[in-house]
Amino acid sequence: MAANAETIETVRNLGGEYKYGFVTNIESEILPKGLNEDTIRFISAKKGEPQWMLDWRLKAYRAWLKMAEKGEPTWARVHYPKIDFQDIHYYAAPKKKALKSMDEVDPELLKTYEKLGIPLKERAALAGVAVDAVFDSVSVATTFKEKLRGLGIIFCSMSEAVREHSDLVQKYIGSVVPITDNFYATLNSAVFSDGSFVYIPPGVRCPMELSTYFRINEANTGQFERTLIICDKGAYVSYLEGCTAPMRDENQLHAAVVELVAMEDAEIRYATVQNWYPGDKEGRGGIYNFVTKRGACRGARSKISWTQVETGSAITWKYPSVILQGDDSVGEFYSVAVANNAQQADTGTKMIHLGKNTKSTIISKGISAGRAQNTYRGLVRVMPNAKGARNYSQCDSLLIGDRCGGHTVPYIEVKNRSAKVEHEATTSRISDDQLFYCRSRGLSGEDAVSTIVNGFCKEVLQKLPMEFAVEAQKLLGVSLEGSVG
Amino acid sequence: MLEIKNLHATVDGKKILNGIDLTIKAGEVHAIMGPNGSGKSTLSYVLAGREGYEVTEGDILFKGRSLLGLEPEERAREGIFLAFQYPVEIPGVANATFLRSAVNAVRKHRGLADMDAMTFLKTAKAKMKELQMDEKFLQRAVN
């Protein structure tokens, strides 16, 4: 009841100030480009959000305006033309017309799905063919949700969570990535579109891997995605984000925020496979993937591990991190980042050791080809009270060809004498000898590169859930096509 | 089976092979000997089709078909096998995985279906027993 009253209130406010003249048509799917306070109110009203959520968004927006005056951060090793924040749709880009059959799908796209080994049923859904014509995803998702509900697990879209589980969301949102954390996180806090919300009750082990694939009513997400995952005491969840299929989007800027909270003895595994459109060979038109991901190991003996395979996007800029507050908590980061042609990547992690006997492991594999620039940027910080902290970091770069670059920027700040911090780094090339050896055994040039690269990334790929691991291997091969020769 | 006719080859512009003729019939074993720098390795690499080795004159016929113009993997699939003096390492790639990929590449070329993992392991283990090799080598990284 309260929610309805708030919504009416918001709409009334909207009616008073709105300039664009279509306030009566709340059903409209399209909001013209541009960003101002009315945009935020529109988004919040459209989603039927409670007042506190709107207030939160507005607070973030006002903070962002101040940041915008100073300008975007420029310390990363990535270059891109200045972004015009007024030239973006902040609520649902115009929906593409659904295709009627597989015959209408771009044959190149189908070829890629074939190479990646994506099951036939899924190809149609991914290609944008009207889903009910081919594949009954709705019923699959429904039976799945029933099972989870029985265990007390909440897994729904962020929009739904803000309405149906408002108290929970309000308690945790912004607690790991504060509203004013950084430029893009602040923007996200103001205009976030949708994402996932997961809550696992105490002692419950989520029986299946949660994947965004199963979220029904997925609006045009991906643009300003906001995800919040909470594992209560002793709980466990494994979450998969993304897919290997090449994804296009009308919107170029993707500024997502993911927050993870792990209580005592809880464990969260978060895996990402990202293959957003990287742009053409000159790097034009690709997606900008500017993401803030952070996990808080709040309770003792809690554990958070991030595993990522990033092969797409024109620019990948993200540092999935873990704050190790609880004693004996563990943080892990496993990453494969590929940059080919004109792609740029500045990615890594931050492990902040606060509690006692905390442990972190970082294994980063960067692969550069073409004219790409790949930078690993990591921070290992041991605070003064973090007695007995342990960290192991390994950063390996693989260069293919002679026009690309691999860079490593490790920051190590240790303020407690009992800490043990280890850092190893290697840089290597795929040698002509290795390639010739493979080819002399019958493997084609492409397969040789794929074999060598997969061997290079093996440690990280092993951390992925099985289905993802197989797809990821194929994806690595596909993303490096044409890099040798 | 293998006919090398008046083979001239250069490496980095330097002439190494100056008109080699050699005919090898099926079942025969030929040992080629010579002092360092006489071109023994070069001959092997030219046969295998390694990049950087240019044939300036002559021909190589394998089972009646010219090898010149064929990529290294194509020659391998035809049946040319080069044992390396200094085999390379490929970290993270298990011998079993690599061998199976190679076997299937050759099988595909011959129009045969892929050998599945189970059959491959069985076959490999049988051969290893014959050669008195420890099975553990299958899971070790290449070389």
Image (cartoon, helix red, strand yellow):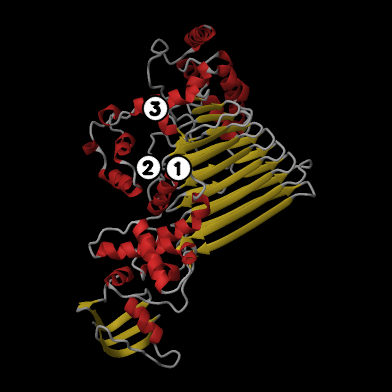
Q: Hey, which quadrant is residue A184 in on the image?
A: top right
- In the visual, does B55 lie left or right of A214? left
Rendered location of residue A55, percent (x, y): 59, 17
Q: Identify the secondary structure beneath mark 2.
A: loop
| Kind of residue at disc 2 | Ala
Q: Earlier in the sequence, mark 3 or mark 1?
A: 3
Chain where mark 1 sits: A
| Kind of residue at disc 1 | Gln
Q: Tag on residue A245? A: 2
Q: Is residue A485 visible?
A: no
Q: Hey, which quadrant is residue A145 in on the image?
A: top left
Q: Is residue A479 visible?
A: yes
Q: Earlier in the sequence, mark 3 or mark 2?
A: 3
Characterize the local packing of mark 3: few (<14), some (14-19) or many (20 or more) Cα atoms within 10 angstroms. some
- Mark 3 → mark 1, Cα distance in angstroms: 22 Å
- In the visual, does A479 lie left or right of B91? left
Residue found farthest to the bottom: B35
Looking at the image, residue B64 lies above or below residue B16: above
Characterize the local packing of mark 1: few (<14), some (14-19) or many (20 or more) Cα atoms within 10 angstroms. many
Q: Identify the secondary structure beneath mark 1.
A: strand
Q: Looking at this view, is A445 or A299 the one in front?
A: A299
Q: Tag on residue A141? A: 3
Please state which of the two labelled residues, at mark 3 or mark 2, is closer to the viewer: 3
Residue found farthest to the left: B64
- In the visual, does B86 lie left or right of B64? right
Q: Earlier in the sequence, mark 2 or mark 1?
A: 2
Residue at image mark 1: A274
